[in-house]
Image: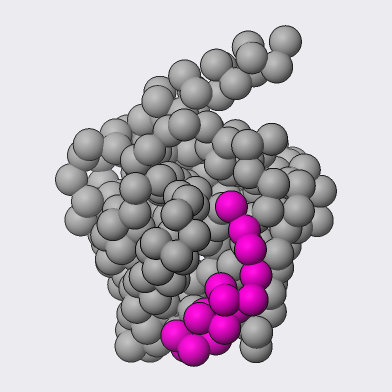
Amino acid sequence: MKYKNILLTGASGKLGKAIATFHIFPSLLTPSREILDITQQDTIKKFFDNNNFDAVVHCAALARMRECEENPTKAIETNIIGTSNLVNAVISKERKSGKKIRFVHISTDGVYPGIKGNYSEKDETVPYNTYGWTKLGAECAANSLSNFCIIRTSFFDPENIKFDDASTDAYSSKAPISYVVKAILTLLNSSFIGTINVGRERRTDYEHYKEFKPKIKKCKLLDIKKTISFRMYKDASMDISLWKKIEKKNETNKK
């Protein structure tokens, strides 16, 4: 394991909890928001001064799309300014310690337009809602580091699919949360620097969910749009060929 002491932000969120409870990472620091609030620079400085770590897995974010639309100021403060605060602290700690800190930033497929699908990492980034724009801003901050990996992804919890129907005409590269957790570990310990799409092959949302919830019903994207106040994607699928190469190489090295 290349990095043994890892700071995990957003440990109380869905992805953060999964990372902490799957027990596949070595030593994790999982401070609560009261101890490490990325929107409060003084808490970041205090935590960084009092703790040693080799890597950061940054999951903390305001991720609820409706809340981002209703309170864009909070979304900006958390996703853009909060990430910038964290990045600045990492840069400062690197200068003091003389060593590079691995920084894995969890982004979203929502940075793409969500119209034509099969987006590669080199495609234009024109988000379709406030959440996507703020996550794109966060990516800009992460790009200021030298040892970073930005993961664009979309995940769901197969054991907690709360809705009873899913769209048969909206496409994505969604992946089960366990798949994304394992991908984060692989990329954390890889030498990859840059931005990478992580997910599964393109399917309709209905197909993604039906695999784990057989009784889920079919609906149309238009039906979903009638019930929400924010924009949705038509085709948010991603070109995952780069990730597949790294995944295959990692599996080969394990043998």
Toward the viewer: 177 or 21? Answer: 21
Q: Is residue 175 visible?
A: no
Height in image: 214 above or below 134? above
Q: Is residue 46 left or right of residue 5?
A: left
Residue at point 34%, 40% (across, down):
194
Height in image: 206 above or below 34? above
Residue at point 72%, 58% (across, down):
28
Could you tell me residue 209's position as x and y percent? 63, 44
Residue at point 36%, 30% (across, down):
239
Quarter of the picture holding the N terminus: top right
Q: Is residue 9 left or right of residue 40?
A: right
Q: Look at the image and name its color scheme.
A: one colour
Height in image: 198 above or below 51? above
Q: Is residue 73 left or right of residue 254?
A: left
Q: Which residues are magenta?
A: 40-54
**Which quadrant holds residue 50?**
bottom right
Could you tell me residue 58's position as x and y percent? 52, 61
Q: Is residue 78 magenta?
A: no
Q: Is residue 48 magenta?
A: yes
